[in-house]
Image (tube, rainbow, N blue to C red):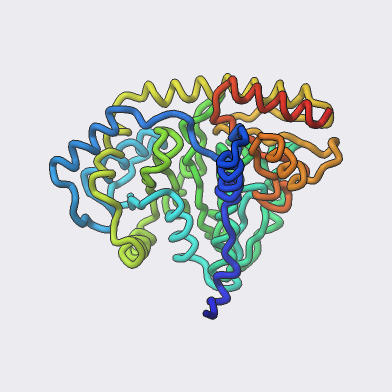
Amino acid sequence: MKLAKSIERLGTETAFEVLAKAKKLEAQGKDIVHLEIGEPDFETPDHIKEAAKKALDDNFTHYVPSPGLMEVREVIAEHQSEVHNKNISPENVVFTPGAKPIMFFTIMALIEPGDEVIYPNPGFPIYESMINYVGGKAVPMELKEEKGFNADVDLIEQSVSDKTKLIILNSPNNPCGSVMEPSDMKRVADIAKEKDIVILTDEVYKDLYFEGSHNSVYDYDGMEENVVILDGFSKSYAMTGWRLGYGIFPNQLVEPISRLVTNSVSCTSAFSQKAAAAAIQGPQDSVRMMLKEFKERSKIVVNGFNDIKGISCIQPKGAFYAFPNIKETGYKSQELSDALLNQGVAVLPGTSFGKYGEGYLRISFANSRENLLKALNIIKEFLD
């Protein structure tokens, strides 16, 4: 069998590879503390599950329009209108099975071979993977620790060329837990507007700020036709296995994106869309509870790493990740990640998120305080 050349350009998400290795060790009787997977360690709230059950009983079990059920798109549009203080039409909402298709479809719709995409590095690995897959040129936007793991906008501006078609932003950020300053966002918005570049803003962690409130490049005047908002339900509502996401698209992109949905998955399951509406319209206590707990865990992780010789860690401002600096340990990222797995702690090397992740680990603190302290103790004893 001869595979297409394009499949060789397709990357992966290392978290699932490390998870598989960790599960294999567990099957052999080894105790593993899981800090590798980006998944809330909470259950989906009952009212959301009940809405899905009711939708099944009400026979929401058939095909629906590719962009989604209109009544659910209306709920999302109202929600996003409140978030961004703008009047967003449900016609601009496209519902997808998971948030990743929004990245996939946006890049497929916009990028031709040779087109350039500026993306965060360290950053979610699927950005670079999809750019490469369609034949685009991935131009890294280095996130620097001295800037709180944010990009230097002067360097972004220097990276823009006549071939730049798309800029990807992610705030709060995976893997660093960083948050872009509003002034930097405004400058990126101005650059995109002036050069007629589309911005894909990944906002799946918008409900998980440890301080301040959500900032978006979409909020600035006149950005509606230059910005795609990517959002979903996995992180805010502990619904990773439900595979529910959506995009807010400029008018010109709605039809081609809907056509990509039709050609790939037909539509997103109807009953799960009803559950998504219940998530937005229902009580938000669970979201606030998770946020409070993640904030406390972040302090445990940061203090713990800063107490380990050779490691330093800055305080994340959102999401549920820390990105400790391990350069003084003498280990490379992959080397230390592999060693710690054998010690019973599953983490990710920073290089899983791009070349600028060398010298770092990514820690998901979506685990109990007890397990976080246990993992920190194992890492400290190993390095001592």
The C terminus sits in image quarter = top right
Residue 63: quarter of image:
bottom left
Position of 304 compared to 320: left or right? Answer: right
- Let me know if residue 177 appears in the view: no
Looking at the image, residue 312 lies above or below residue 274: above
Q: How many marks?
A: 0
The residue sitting at 59% across, 36% down in the picture is 29
Residue under the point 74% across and 30% down: 379
Residue 313 visible? The answer is yes
Given the current orientation, which residue lies at the most extreme bottom position? 2
Residue name at image x 66 percent, y 50 percent: 352
Q: Is residue 29 left or right of residue 283?
A: right
Nearest to the observer: residue 91 or residue 41 = 41
Q: Residue furthest left?
A: 58
Q: Splitting the image into 4 quarters, where does residue 150 fall?
A: top right
x and y, in percent, of residue 84 in the image: 41, 37
Residue 78 in the image, given as x and y percentages of width and height = 30, 38
Please name the residue shown 43% across and 54% down the image: 102
Q: Position of residue 331 (x, y in %)?
A: 82, 42
Q: Position of residue 197 (x, y in %)?
A: 54, 59
Q: Is residue 289 above or below residue 149?
A: above
Q: Which one is in front, 32 or 370?
A: 32
Q: Quadrant of residue 185?
A: top right
Indicate left or right for 76 with 160 as reference. Answer: left
